[in-house]
Amino acid sequence: MVKIAPSILSADFARLGEEIKELDRAGADWIHFDVMDGQFVPNISFGYKILGDIKSLTSLPFDVHLMVHEPYDYLEPFAKKGADYITIHVEACKEPSKYFKKIRELGVKPGITLSPDTPVEAIKPYLDEVDLVLVMSVHPGFGGQSFIPSALDKLKQLDALRKENNYHYLLEVDGGVGIKNAEEIRATGVDVLVAGSAVLGSADYQKTMEELRG
């Protein structure tokens, strides 16, 4: 069964702590934590202090998605504040292997992300170095966008590569995931669905996540 990782970018920040606890009680598997610097993407979200402040509110893994330019200097602060996964964009760094090595040294699981316009070929050299591959199915930087269908082919391709090469990464998708398209997305072999507004904008978090799982 797929894991559900609600993106707290869609949370009510005035009651963020309560939202985290509600997601935990409702059966979320992970918490997806989007970090934006206003450079790699035009928006700005939140930093490692907020991660540290909310980490103790749940035992759920925190999946930290760095949408930042040259993320190397961010790795240690987020690791120290409690990240369980740290995912970097292949488009944001010149030597991804250096980042993965550092993330592992910090006791965290490394991941790689590709944006909608980036082909799978761009991350092929690194697939044996990561624990998580995140396919963006919207353009990074803003919540509430519509799912980009080409992400389905990327997910299928990455699932096939994993099986052919005995890779061990989890396959995650982020952007425009909802109840209407969840079945089609699940059929690709994906392991983790990131859902922001679909969950946090719903009246019943538990029911929505159960429907997303299928």
Image (cartoon, rainbow, N blue to C red):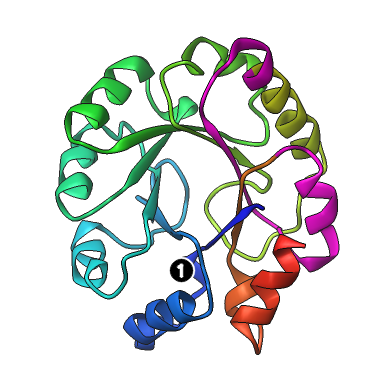
User: Would residue 19 appear left or right of 54 to someone viewing this image?
Assistant: right
> Which residue is located at x 47 percent, y 51 percent?
42
- 140 to 122, vertically: above or below: below
The answer to which of 49 and 54 lies nearer the viewer is 54
In percent of width and height, residue 203 lies at 65, 89
Q: Is residue 3 above or below residue 200?
A: above
* Vertical side of 190 occupied by 166: above or below: above
Range covered by the magenta-colored residues:
162-189
Neighbour tally class for label 1: few under 14, some 14-19, many 20 plus, Cα within 10 Å:
many
Which residue is most to the front? 1
Q: Which residue is mark 1?
A: 8
Which quadrant is home to the C terminus?
A: bottom right
Residue 104 in percent (x, y) is at 25, 28
Image location of residue 14, percent across then percent down: 36, 87
- Residue drawn at the location 58% of the way across and 15% of the way down: 166
Residue type at numbered disc 1? Ile
